[in-house]
Amino acid sequence: MRFKNTLSLVASLTTAFFIVTHSPLATASNLAQNFNFDGVLVDDATGTPMAGPVSIKFQIYNPAGSCLLFEETHPAVALASDGSFSVLVGSGTRASAAVDGGLSLKTVFQNSGLVRGVDATYCPSAYTPTSGDARKLRTIVNATALTPDFTLSPVPSATVAESLQGKAAADFI
């Protein structure tokens, strides 16, 4: 199975975050803690669209792909006749905090301070991002990881814009 129409994904992510971050309603209290992921699934061997429903697991990693920051599953994603789908990442069934640290998407995309400490299984070395760090989005369909991972940069990182690198408006007044 493979994923096609990456341009559609980029356009959807860009559009969604532009609307959210440039809307007059986008204040610190109501910014969405999710983002839309659109794609098309086709069978590698035949090139025909996959039939659904499918289970899709999303994992967000540090730039090196070595520290799991977020994991959720959408167990029954409907596919259109052409294999296309649309999922709201951030609205699925979360993995236990023992697996992904229980971090919010806001924390996952912040680029200051320690994001996740050492966990022998899921984050062998702690992750402290630097300014402008991207994240890796791993997509797993019906227990098969799609490759390569997607790079999430910089638009989904804008979810941290509801604060100034973790400082609320009240911290400056």
Image (cartoon, helix red, strand yellow):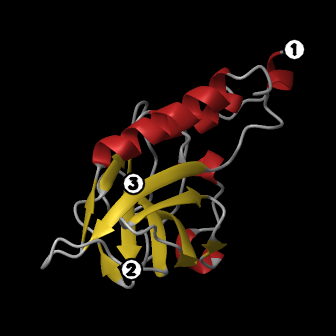
Q: Amino acid at mark 1?
A: Ile
Which of the 4 image quadrants contains residue 95?
bottom right
Q: Nearer the viewer, residue 78 or 98?
A: 78
Which residue is pictured at 37% across the width and 85% down the height? 143
Task: Decide: is 160 above or below 172.
Answer: below
Q: Nearer the viewer, residue 92 or 8?
A: 8
- Asked if marks 3 and 1 touch (Cβ < 8 Å), the reply is no
Residue 98 placement, left or right of 128: right
The residue beneath circle 2 is 51
The residue beneath circle 3 is 62
Earlier residue among tags 3 and 2: 2
The residue beneath circle 1 is 173
Task: Decide: is 9 above or below 72.
Answer: above
Q: Can you give x and y, in whole percent of width and height, for residue 171 in the image? A: 81, 24
Alpha-carbon neighbours of circle 1 within 10 Å: few (<14), some, or many (≥20)?
few
Q: What is the spatial separation of the Cα atoms under label 3 and label 1, in whole angstroms?
A: 33 Å
Q: Nearer the viewer, residue 149 or 160?
A: 149
In the rendered image, the quadrant that contains the N terminus is bottom left
- Asked if marks 2 and 1 touch (Cβ < 8 Å), the reply is no
Q: Can you give x and y, in whole percent of width and height, for residue 13 in the image? A: 48, 40
Which of the 4 image quadrants contains residue 153?
top left
